[in-house]
Image (tube, helix red, strand yellow):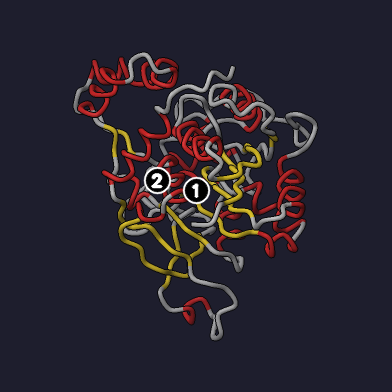
Amino acid sequence: MAKKTVLIDSDFHTLADDHEALLMVAGYHKTGNLDLLGVTTVTGNTWARTGADHAAQAIRRPGLKGLPVAEGAGQPLLHRQSDFAHRSRLYGAAFGGAWGNANLLEKQASPRPDAVHGGRHAVFFLIDQIRQSDAPVTLLAIGPMTNIALALRIAPDIRGNIASVVCMGGAFFVPGNVTPSAEFNWWFDPEAAAIVLEEDLELLIVPLDATDKVVLDFERYRRWSREFADHDVFTHFHGPKFVSVFEKDPGFTLPAWDALAAACLLDERIASRQDSFWVSVDCSEGPSYGRVVAYSDAREFNLETPRRKPARIVLEADGDRFWALYESLVFAPADGSS
């Protein structure tokens, strides 16, 4: 498999699955099997500024000194925080990421539109890195796609140097996880997702259909606590995140989400069943806001002669292969970097 050049766009948090995805990609980067150009952050599970701070801290552990981190869009293109409580009451959106939830909206003010981490906005960082790269760039999109949509609108020429977009998002044949209709990443900024998905790009989509079948459970966590108890990642990530959870509920499970998307980027054999669809997102006001729109026939999208490729959708994943790859990268021996 050809060596890939990768940019990660993420709603990053140190104790979230974005961090696991970064650790996996970083593992390949350190072995020379992949070039990681940087991490950009977007508001979703966390504020973009918080995500940039967390990403900057996180890259120290895998020894990625000097890896650029750029803070991006602080809000979706059109979806408003002020609408969240109202839509939650109407349609059942019980989780709002950085916006809090229906009962307690986060009090933090929205980030300034010009807020940047390290002096360069993520959208322009993406544009510059893609334009300047000698090799086509693969984007790992594991948050709302606001930054990527803006980059494509500002600089449409970058499409020519994007190898593919591997994204965690959508719910095709299963219920959503933020509303009955929608998965969180695409619900948070449906308009941005629609822009990216309707571009003529190679798309590999890892939706809830696949991620919800690959879960961390107590048995696996207990084995890790025996085998990797002294590993830095277990000490600072898995332990603080899960120890009290499994104590309260040994039946608790957590889907792989972003880590599975990273794994499919690194080893497409993990995607054990795929299908192809022309995909977009429902951006209409109402209970289907953020829902996947997908057809197997391009003519359903009024594309008599398709102007873009269908997306490849991962519907099932090889869990054993995934966890083997995960453990080999996330629990790799420390290299001594600070």
Disc 1: CA contacts within 10 A as few (<14), some (14-19) or many (>=20): many
Q: Nearer the viewer, residue 105 or 333?
A: 333
Residue drawn at x 57%, y 51% is 4
Q: Amino acid at mark 1?
A: Trp
- In the displayed structure, 304 sits above or below 263; it is below
Residue where numbered disc 1 is placed:
187
Q: Is residue 264 left or right of residue 302?
A: left
Q: Is residue 51 left or right of residue 154?
A: left
Contact check, label 2 and label 1, Cβ < 8 Å = yes
Residue drawn at x 59%, y 17% is 338
Disc 2: CA contacts within 10 A as few (<14), some (14-19) or many (>=20): many
Using the rendered view, name the quadrant where residue 274 is placed.
bottom left
* Local SS, label 1: helix
* Local SS, label 2: loop
All told, the count of numbered labels is 2
Q: Is residue 288 left or right of residue 224?
A: right
Residue drawn at x 42%, y 28% is 332
Most extreme residue toward the bottom is 304
Using the rendered view, name the quadrant where residue 37 is placed.
top right
Q: Which mark is residue 115?
A: none
- In the displayed structure, 312 sits above or below 94; it is below
Q: Position of residue 89 (x, y in %)?
A: 42, 39
Residue where numbered disc 2 is placed:
179
Which numbered disc flags the more N-terminal residue, 2 or 1? 2
Q: CA distance from mark 2 to mark 1?
A: 8 Å
Q: Amino acid at mark 2?
A: Thr
Q: Position of residue 249 (x, y in %)?
A: 22, 22
